[in-house]
Image: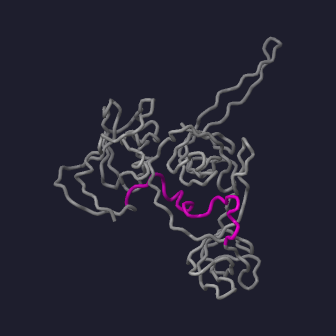
């Protein structure tokens, strides 16, 4: 629980150091003077109401680096006020109040705060294994047998596993390696897709060299011998402010989750850049398609012309691995395809 003194949230400090973008901040054409936060709002949705570019949220709040990673929580019932001519002439957002009131102390849980992006879309992916990095399978817990010698196991069936020590965690995810992720430009192997099969619950710890016994509590895909187990971590509350990377990041979409050929709004994609490239939680990248080269013959002379790249969408990074990151498509005016470019907007 967090203790909040409401009188202190009437406005945010304007003395915070923040790197300003060279381009002026543009408001959305129908930006309101204020917005009352309601259940179901997201930071992205509110930012889109006020700003032409929602990823410039930290700038209109004057957030420094630490506050970007741990921003002020915003709760249903609070009022966001737009100051159209804030510090330095740039617009600024502040927290206001509906009525004048005496300062008072009240309590709200962090989980009551509005999230950065729609939680129902990404929550299953915040704890599930998504990427298997090279060497990661060595020593992993593994299914060695199923209940009554079944070829495959589903919900309610038993699994027997090796590699689980004592004391053994109670809840587990079951997965297997899938498609290899390769950088489309360099052919470097970035990792392997982790195909989520289901969840299992510990029912009996191993005794000596015996196998550990588990029960399948959720089956998405049939589970068999050789499949891997990973401790089911509690999903992290994703509250990072949406923002553009400070450095130039450029990569490609390497996969669309679910094995489909194209993606749209609120689809999940994997990109060919990760921690080593400076990608962070909350980064917003633009999606574009490389312009084609067309050849025409005019006056018996062939001429080739390269068409410009076309930016057509935005994505929000919600999970980052060493060489790969997963992102949610937030805006898209055309189908998103594998090998489309993602880069700092």
- Residue 278 location in percent, x, y? 56, 45
Q: 296 or 136, which lies in front?
A: 136
Q: 77 or 274, which lies in front?
A: 274
Query: What residue span does the magenta drawing correspond to?
Result: 112-140
- Residue 117 location in percent, x, y? 48, 52
From what the image shows, is residue 67 above or below residue 31?
below
Q: 288 or 129, which lies in front?
A: 129
Tell me what residue is drawn at x 45 percent, y 30 percent: 22
From what the image shows, is residue 74 above or below residue 86?
below
Extreme right residue here? 300
- Residue 96 location in percent, x, y? 26, 47
Left or right: where 184 falls relative to 15? right
Tell me what residue is drawn at x 34 percent, y 65 percent: 1
Residue 134 is a magenta residue: yes
Quadrant containing the C terminus is: top right
Tell me what residue is drawn at x 66 percent, y 41 percent: 340
Extreme left residue here? 102
From what the image shows, is residue 217 above or below residue 72?
below
Extreme top residue here? 299
Quarter of the rendering containing residue 170: bottom right
- Residue 134 location in percent, x, y? 70, 58
Left or right: where 98 falls relative to 322? left
């Amino acid at each position: 629980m967090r203790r909040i003194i409401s009188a202190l949230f009437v406005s945010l400090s304007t003395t915070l150091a923040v790197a300003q973008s060279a381009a002026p901040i543009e408001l959305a054409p129908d930006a309101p003077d204020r917005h009352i936060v309601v259940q179901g709002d997201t930071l992205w949705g509110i930012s889109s109401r006020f700003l032409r570019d929602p990823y410039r949220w930290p700038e209109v709040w004057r957030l420094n680096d630490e506050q970007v990673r741990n921003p002020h929580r915003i709760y249903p019932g609070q009022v966001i006020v737009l100051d159209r001519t804030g510090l330095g002439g740039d617009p600024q957002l502040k927290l206001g109040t509906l009525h004048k009131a005496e300062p008072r102390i009240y309590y709200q849980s962090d989980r009551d705060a509005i999230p950065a992006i729609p939680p129902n879309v990404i929550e299953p992916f915040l704890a599930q294994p998504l990427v298997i990095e090279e060497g990661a399978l060595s020593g992993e817990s593994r299914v060695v047998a199923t209940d009554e010698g079944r070829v495959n196991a589903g919900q309610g069936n038993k699994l027997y596993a090796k590699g689980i020590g004592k004391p053994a965690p109670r809840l587990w995810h079951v997965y297997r390696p899938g498609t290899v992720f390769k950088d489309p430009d360099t052919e470097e192997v970035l990792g392997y897709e982790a195909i989520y099969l289901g969840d299992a619950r510990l029912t009996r710890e191993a005794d000596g060299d015996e196998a550990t016994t588990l029960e399948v509590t959720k089956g998405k895909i049939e589970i068999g011998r050789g499949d891997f187990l990973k401790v089911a971590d509690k999903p992290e509350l994703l509250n990072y402010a949406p923002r553009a990377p400070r450095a130039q990041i450029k990569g490609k979409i390497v996969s669309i989750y679910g094995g489909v050929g194209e993606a749209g709004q609120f689809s999940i994609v994997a990109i060919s850049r990760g921690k080593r490239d400076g990608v962070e939680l909350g980064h917003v990248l633009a999606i574009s398609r490389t312009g084609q080269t067309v050849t025409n013959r005019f006056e018996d002379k062939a001429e080739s012309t390269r068409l410009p790249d076309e930016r057509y969408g935005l994505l929000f990074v919600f999970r980052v691995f060493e060489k790969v990151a997963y992102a949610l498509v937030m805006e898209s005016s055309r189908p998103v395809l594998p090998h489309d470019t993602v880069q700092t907007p």
